[in-house]
Image: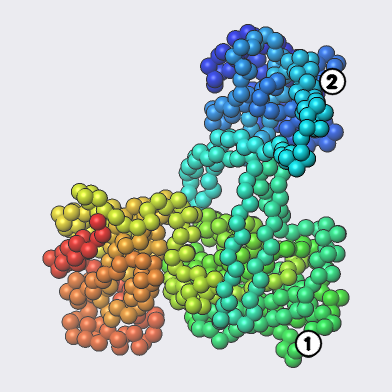
Amino acid sequence: MHSVAHKQRTSPNCFHQPQKHRCRNNWRSSVPGNYGERSSLYDSSSQRQTTNTSGVFYISGEKKTWQLERQHPLWWQGWNGKTKKTYSCSPPTHTHAERYTILPLHHIAIALGEDKAMACLVHRPRKLMQLSLLGFLLLPFLFLVVLKPRLDPSSFLSLQVSVRSSIRIEVVEEKTSSSDDHDDKTMDMPIALESRPEEKKSATYAAEMVQLPPPPRQQNHSEMGLVTQIPNATKDEEEATRYSAAVPSSKISCDFSQRRSDTCIMHGDVRVLGSSILLVKTSTDASSSETTWRIKPYARKWEAPVMELIRELPIRVASEASETPNCTARHAVPAVVFSTGGFSGKNFFHDFSDVLIPLFITSRRYHGEVQFLVTNFNPRWINRYEAILKRLSNYEVVDMDRDDRVRCFRNAHVGLMSHSELVIDPAKAPNNYSMADFRELLRSCFSLRRKSVRLGGSSKPRLLLMLRKGSRSLTNKRAVMSLARRLGFRVVVAGPEQTKNLSRFAVVVNSCDVMVGVHGAGLTNMLFLPANATLIQIIPWGGLRYASNHDYGDPTAAMGIRYSEYEVRQEESSLVKQYPIDHPVFTDPLSIHRQGWNALWSVFLDRQSIKLDVRRFRGVLQETIRSLPR
């Protein structure tokens, strides 16, 4: 502990000042840093920041020890320079402040994250206390000596002194998200945390030939009792030896039969070097004719143009460990490998349908004890969905294309399991996970309060009108808003600018009872709606009902959301100004579909805007407001 070169006597009114000013003018220290700066106690031998609760200081050359306690004879007071919050324990009111010596040890780090609490320690002579303590300790001994002959040995009680205490410390937690603003949240942190109950065992996943075992939960307790995360990788030689000695036989199972994605599951000595994945066989492994596989870990394999943008990862079986590079990072948790290429970061619907929901299906069973390895690494995408990724994995995402380390795992899952657009099939998912579980994860990530719709007696339901710019825009949006208000809705309008801040907009969506919008990626925000809310999808002209239902209508049932749709007639479409009334666009829209995706997109999705017939749309809104639960 950095020694304090001088002592200072506090004034009699030190402990009688207002709390946030208490002892403020009496803090002076030879430790570097002035009042209000971030500094810490340092170990003079190693120059490391310390969070120990005891230490040594010197007063006039005399060595003293201190112990951070909550009670007599030593008190401490902390002041947080960032949040202007005080943490203090004052001496008993019957004592006189002049009898105490203030030891200006400057800042003390007590598990407050980035915030440090300034502290002054109070010391008083301990002779009387030591005598009292000695007498107190002698009482049980005298009791046993005098009374033991009269007592039956079986009547003794087993007395146990509890040493566990819980100090409530008010701290400020700074959330990290894609938002530009940061919300401060006050929470209580106990000194000792209970271990989390063991999660229920995984159910058998029928669609996978090999089930990855759930990883062991590991916890590390610091001296202050706070649970901290053990680093996922280690270079410790003893651990490396233990890891190598216990490597199981190698197994690999690849499934290329699914429509949406390919997956390979590996057990044994799995080594990842950049974009190459090796499985080292042991001497007891059965021989296999196939030793090389190639996989693109993106869940949209039927769309060839998109898959051309995804890096192909080679998976190779090596017969000898000597043929493979040595491990430089060993991981005690499984790896999940996926891509953030393709549509990732370009389309909100595909962010969830192609990556986030498949990632949830694949990794949720590990309860955070899993390492994500990402190819086609998209840093903006990672930052935007950081809150979700941190709920699924306790470790930093690794850019495997640029990683120069040889990372070794005992289990790896390359590629993501995917069932359908915005849908999880519980019969195929590990642990029978469902969309209800995924939506619960989102509520936790973004602190969404409303779990289901329940209107009060006279409260107006909130209607969220999703607006688009350019293609598929509503040209008479003001008339639609006016209609909704006349029918009794409180209208909330959101355009592309309002949806950029995901964490903030998720809260807005969750506050609404009805969402209305033209078919498009913005409707994916229905994921944040409370249960029993209603989605009204406006389907553009052009035979798009099947595709619209597949993308947004069908998934609502698994989400617990009500669904209604409004199909646009040709007179409500801007296409009447671009094509004659006898054109196949109106007489045979499916003939445009048969020309391929590019033709369909160009005509019906990219060039069409909509002017709703508000008299016809009125009936949809009336039925919706009547059906809302109250």
Q: Is residue 588 left or right of residue 185?
A: left
Residue 187 in sight here: yes
Q: Quadrant of the C terminus?
A: bottom left
Query: At 32% across and 80% down in the image, what residue appears?
Result: 546
Residue displayed at 19% across by 81% down:
580
Task: Name above or below for residue 449 compared with residue 585.
Answer: above
The spot of residue 136 in percent (x, y) is 75, 23
Label 2 is placed on what type of residue?
Lys
In percent of width and height, residue 230 lies at 71, 53
Q: Would residue 344 be seen by someone viewing this image from the given angle?
A: no
The residue lying at 33 percent from left, 76 percent from top is 549
> Residue at left 68%, top 42%?
225
Residue that carries the numbered disc 1 in the rendered image: 286
Q: Is residue 185 above or below residue 618?
A: above
Q: Is residue 199 above or below residue 221?
A: below
Could you say which quadrant of the image residue 166 lies in?
top right
The residue closer to the viewer here, 306 or 328, is 328
Report the residue marked by disc 2. Answer: 63
User: How far is mark 1 from mark 2, CA to CA?
Assistant: 69 Å
